[in-house]
Amino acid sequence: MSFWLSDESDDKFRKMMAEARRMEDRTLRALKEFEHTQGCMVPLYEFRATPDGYAITVDMPGVKKDEVTLLFEGDHIAITAPCVTEAGKKRQGKKVRYFIDLTLPRGIDEKRIKASMKGGLLKIDMKKAAGGRQLKIE
Amino acid sequence: MFFDGMPDTGLVGTIAAQHVVASKNMSLSTRIDSDLLPPVVVVKDMDLLEPMVLYRSGDLSVLTSEVPIPTEIAKPFAKELVGWISSKKFRAVISLGGVADPNRPETENPEVLYVTNAAKVFSSEIDLSKLKTLDSAFLVGSKAAFLLECFRANIPTLGVFAQSFPNYPDPGASASALSALSGMKELKVDLTELVKSGEEMRVRFRDLMRRTTGEMERAQKSRELESPSLVV
């Protein structure tokens, strides 16, 4: 058995998808323009909640831990590292670097931020600042 | 044999497909064009290539793509493609992809899972007992639509999925998946170079990964992390 949406709802769906694609293209265009004007590559990253804070992973192939500069300031973390891969140099020139500036959620304990690096994947673990009070269930 | 390397989670199939094409020095055999696909061409050596092409060597045809399949055309495109595959009478279809694993950064050797409609056909070449079956899961996106059409058309089909980074190109997962398929003579390739050049690959494929991530979000790819409610 087949079921098809009506032409009208099908048309609405296509328009919605086209708008989503336009918005995505604007974002990607801004990102690529930033890369070209600044001579950098914005790495892919993921942001996840953990039970007591947040974890960010940043994909920076070819980078070793001693080459990464992490600057935490207020609600931002700026990550810079040289990109030494051939594919990177081919795209952005010889002195290409990775750069990303991420806005963080509020309430992070600055003293409990830890970073580690393995296989070009930077992992930053952040804990929420202590506080709040435990509630009793009556 | 038809090998599908359409962009999907971790670009596992796409990276594997390009490695197979390069390792076997395969030749461009078929250009795929459709009004359903976005108007994109690839400029290479003073030639204009369609973003989706097939490479061939002997009985093996490998599909590679420079663009993710737009979600709204995933189904009609899969029907068209499988119709063509049926008409060409390929002996089997292998579709290679990734299954998102949030714990991938801690995983050295990604697990490989499979779904097939022809275990007997494939078990003579691959030790399927070494792989996990994809028993109860959601598959979402162009690869899901493609597999469904292959099953409907009764083409012997093997869907292979390696645990992968959800949103980063994952050559390690591609290597694991290809290693699991190394019993098939058409897909037996040296994986040393793929593993060695993993970091270069991750840089090379990151733009396609960004586009593919957008497409996966539109297809509600997060459903693959959920479990079906079906109990019978």
Image (spheres, rainbow, N blue to C red):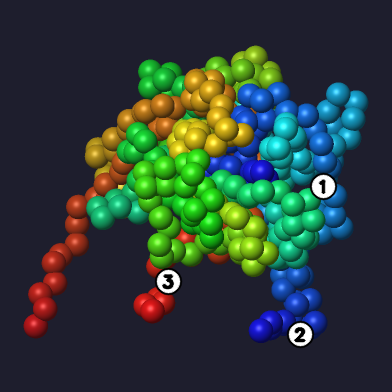
Three-letter code, disc 2? Ser
The secondary element bearing badge 1 is classed as strand
Quadrant for the N terminus of chain A in the image: bottom right
Asked if residue B168 shows in the view, the reply is no
Residue appearing at x 82%, y 36% in the figure: B29
B141 over A83 or under it: above or below? below
Q: Please name the residue that numbered disc 1 is placed on.
A: B32
Residue appearing at x 50%, y 35% in the figure: B183
Tag 3 near tag 1, CB within 8 Å: no
* Neighbour tally class for label 3: few under 14, some 14-19, many 20 plus, Cα within 10 Å: few
Chain containing the residue with disc 3: B
Residue A128 location, x and y as percent? 27, 51
Three-letter code, disc 1? Ile
B31 over B219 or under it: above or below? above
Q: Please name the residue that numbered disc 3 is placed on.
A: B228
* Neighbour tally class for label 2: few under 14, some 14-19, many 20 plus, Cα within 10 Å: few
Q: Compute the Cα span from label 1 to label 2.
A: 30 Å
Left or right: residue B216 compared with residue A33: left
The quadrant in which residue B63 appears is top right
Q: Please name the residue that numbered disc 2 is placed on.
A: A6
Left or right: residue A20 compared with residue B40: left
> Are the residues under badges 3 and 1 in a single subunit?
yes
Tally of numbered discs? 3
Q: Nearer the viewer, residue B171 or B29?
A: B29
